[in-house]
Amino acid sequence: MATAAIIGGGVIGGGWAARFLLNGWDVQVFDPDPEAERKIGEVIDNARVSLPGLSDTALPPEGRLSFHDSMSEAVAGASWIQESVPERLELKRKVYQTLQEHCEADAILGSSTSGFKPSELQGCASRPEQIVVTHPFNPVYLMPLVELVPTEKNAPALIERAKETLKGVGMFPLHVRKEIDAHIADRFLEAVWREALWLVKDGIATTEEIDEAIRMGFGIRWAQMGLFDTYRVAGGEAGMKHFMAQFGPCLEWPWTKLMDVPEFTDELVDLIAGQSDAQSGHMSIREMERVRDNNLVSMMRALKAQNFASGAVLNQHDKKLSAEAGMVRKSADIADPSLPIVTQRRAVPVDWLDYNGHMTESRYLQAFADASDRLMEIIGCDQEYIATGGSFFTAETHIRHIDETHLGSVIEVRTRVLMAEGKKMHLWHEMYAGEKLLATAEHILIHVSLETRRPAPFSPEIAANLKMIYEAQADLPAPDGLGRYVGQPR
């Protein structure tokens, strides 16, 4: 079991703790705040609800979380150390001196700093080659981006190891090849922030109106396409050159005040704070976090369906999780074909809930359909096979809803092959939460030629794999509920 040390347990440190913990790492925390355990516990509670909803396979077993009275205890045995102390250079350097007295010499020491360059952090370190910037975005347990900023003192092997570790917990490490104050992303945020302060100060817009302009407009575009691709599309068929020719001259117009910063007076602070309280003061911070998390999960799950932007990162992480969990992908991987095959193991995400707060009926069908797709893949009807012109079509489905399940519950579908002959496959699925039976599904699938759209015999490979599973499971007792019609007593 890998171990991460979290030094500083505020909003960012707590998010890092959740990211590592829920991806199977042991997490050791040091924070002198007497409320640190409660605060981090609340962040992790939110993450336990939201993070599993991004995956279409179950996360690994949760690691062990512990809190320590000293940095020396917290870093013991840690291969990754994440520093998230306040943004004061002298404090960070002092922390690094203490950490390096006690941590492993080959541990990676990442800093969450949003502003300092890694060369500044390495300044008086005994082993500067250990220290890199790993700047995340809030909430760390959901947002994939982390800016990885090294210097020439960091060996290429350490940089690659840092990338692999971050990818291993489902993040997207952006290698910033040349250090600069505030890295990359925060420089954009700072520009927007400065302009927003002027718009409020000059009475042009309120905090709510500025937020609406972002979330109703360019924020949605940027979330899935970024800046330059968005403007390339805006240029129409002529592309980026047309956009630049059309809008380039406006850069010389006095549209912004980016080089001029409003004085941070008490009056400006009170004005912005008052507007912000009026805008969202009816919700607690924890309520706002849950709304934010639900929105982020729903948006990124939509991107998963397109295998685009952050959705592509999540799909890659799902493949890794599925492989590590031992999910069967090929018939040769089945340890004991005489037992039902686990074809789905995943958490119930927020967009699978109905108005009663439990999983809606259409998602039971989706989970069972995904299980049938997995069984197809196992027997050899994968994308490569389908490209040759053969596939299975579902001819009949019967679902029984036996118990309810809720947000975050880990569901598992176990599949049996009841019949496989000629052109027909008869599957039986049972959905469980732990050992509680939630639902059953009976599927009849017909093998077809995609060219004629008519029934066609299995390929020899599929026929052999289906026969192997069917014969191995033939001695299992008939499933309870097999062939029952709607309304028939259980």
Image (cartoon, grey):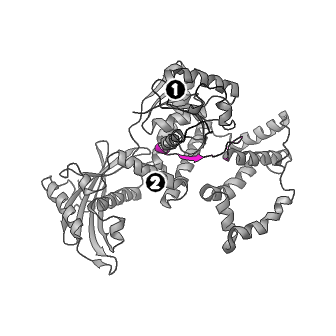
Q: Amino acid at mark 1?
A: Val
User: 158 or 380, which lies in front?
Assistant: 158
Identity of the residue drawn at 43% across and 50% down: 318
Q: Residue furthest bottom?
A: 452
Magenta region: 167-184
Identity of the residue drawn at 41% across and 36% down: 62
What secondary structure is the magenta-colored segment mainly?
Answer: loop
Q: Tell me if I can see residue 346 in this picture.
A: no
Identity of the residue drawn at 19% across and 72% down: 422
In reply to whether residue 50 is colored magenta, the answer given is: no
Q: Is residue 331 above or below residue 41?
A: below
Label 2 Cα crowd, 10 Å radius (few <14 / some 14-19 / many 20+): many
Give the SS element for disc 2.
Answer: helix
Residue wearing tag 2: 315
Describe residue 384's horizontal placement relative to residue 489 as left or right. Answer: right
For the residues labelled 1 and 2, say whether their Cβ atoms are less than 8 Å apart.
no
In reply to whether residue 173 is colored magenta, the answer given is: yes
